[in-house]
Image (spheres, rainbow, N blue to C red):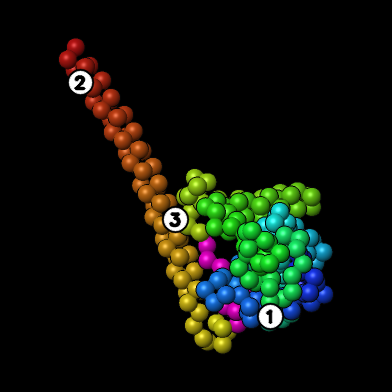
Amino acid sequence: MHAVSEHLPDWADRDARLFWDAVDLYERANARLFVRAIYALPRDFDHAEWVDLARGFAEDLTGLERLPYTLAVHPGFDQEGRIHNPHVHLMISEHRDDGIERARRPWFRAPNRHDPARGGAPRSRVFHQRGWLEDARQHWADRLNTAFERNGRADRVDHRSYARQGIDRQPGLHIGPSAPYLVAQGRPHDRLADAAMTRDDQNRVAAIDQEIASLEGERQGLAHQIERADAVLDRDAGSRGR
C-alpha cells in the first residue's frame, strides 16, 4: 500500500492521522465528514504509474481550492499473492485551506464571513454542484486515456454510460477479489450470482437474436423461391395462351 496526503493544515502536515482524527472529534454532528471515492487502476501498469495517476486525479478534484485529502493505492492481491484488483481509496475534506493558520479545533468551527481569522476553514460547495460527478468521471477518463496513449496502448475508456454512447449493452457488475475465495469455500456470493444471471440472460438474448437472424434468412430464401416459381408459372401460362 502507498499513502499520500496533500493540502493538510500545518498542525497535521507530518501526520495525516492527526487531521482525520480531528475530523472525527471536532466536525459538527450533522456534517459530512469527508467525500470518499474508490476507483480502479490498470492492472498492467507499474506502481509508479499507479501513484502518478492517483495523485493527478486527486489534484484535479482538490487543487483549485486546496482541499485536504489522503489517498491509498492498493495492489489488490488475490489468495495466491498475485496482483488482481489494483485500486485507490481517496478521502477529501470539504474544508478549504484559505491560507489562514488555525489550530486543530478552530479549523472546524463555522466560518466567519466578517472576520475569517476568527472562524473556521470555509467549506467548499463544489461537491454540491450538479455537474460535479460528471466532471470527476471525465477527469479520470482523460487521465487514463493519456496514460494509455503514453504507454502505446490502444485501450481507451469513456466516462459516459453505454446508453449515452449509443451502445446496446448491459453494464457489468464489479464483483471484487473476494468472490472466487468465497465460492471456493462453498459460500454464496450475491454479486457473483447476479453477474452469472446477467451473463446467462445476455447469452440467451444473443442466442435468440441469432435464431431470429437465421429465420429471417430462411424467410428471405423462401420468398425468393416463391418469386421464381411465380415467374415460371406466369411464363408457362403465357406460352399456353399463345
Q: Given the current orientation, which residue lies at the most extreme top position? A: 242
- On screen, residue 163 versus residue 85, left or right, reads left
Q: Quadrant of the N terminus?
A: bottom right
What residue span does the magenta drawing correspond to?
Answer: 172-181
- Residue 14 or 175: which is nearer the viewer? 14
Residue assigned mark 1 = 21
| Amino acid type, residue under disc 2 in the picture | Ala
**Disc assigned to residue 237:** 2
Q: Position of residue 2 (x, y in %)?
A: 78, 73
Give the foreground label among 1 and 3. Answer: 1
Q: Quadrant of residue 65?
A: bottom right
Q: CA distance from mark 1 to mark 3?
A: 53 Å
Q: Indicate whether residue 182 is drawn in magenta.
A: no
156, above or below 47, in the image: above
For the residue carrying disc 2, how many other residues have a C-alpha within 10 Å: few (<14), some (14-19), or many (20+)? few
The earlier-in-sequence mark between 1 and 3 is 1
For the residue carrying disc 1, how many other residues have a C-alpha within 10 Å: few (<14), some (14-19), or many (20+)? few
Residues at circles 1 and 3 in contact by the CB criterion of under 8 Å: no
Q: Quadrant of residue 54?
A: bottom right
| Amino acid type, residue under disc 1 in the picture | Asp
Q: Residue at x 47, y 77 (%)?
A: 190
Q: Residue at x 29, y 30 (%)?
A: 227
Q: Position of residue 101 (x, y in %)?
A: 77, 67
Q: Residue at x 58, y 54 (%)?
A: 132
Q: CA distance from mark 3 to mark 2?
A: 46 Å
- Secondary element under disc 2, as helix, strand or loop, is helix
Q: Residue at x 72, y 76 (%)?
A: 104
Residue assigned mark 3 = 206
Q: Indicate whether residue 180 is drawn in magenta.
A: yes
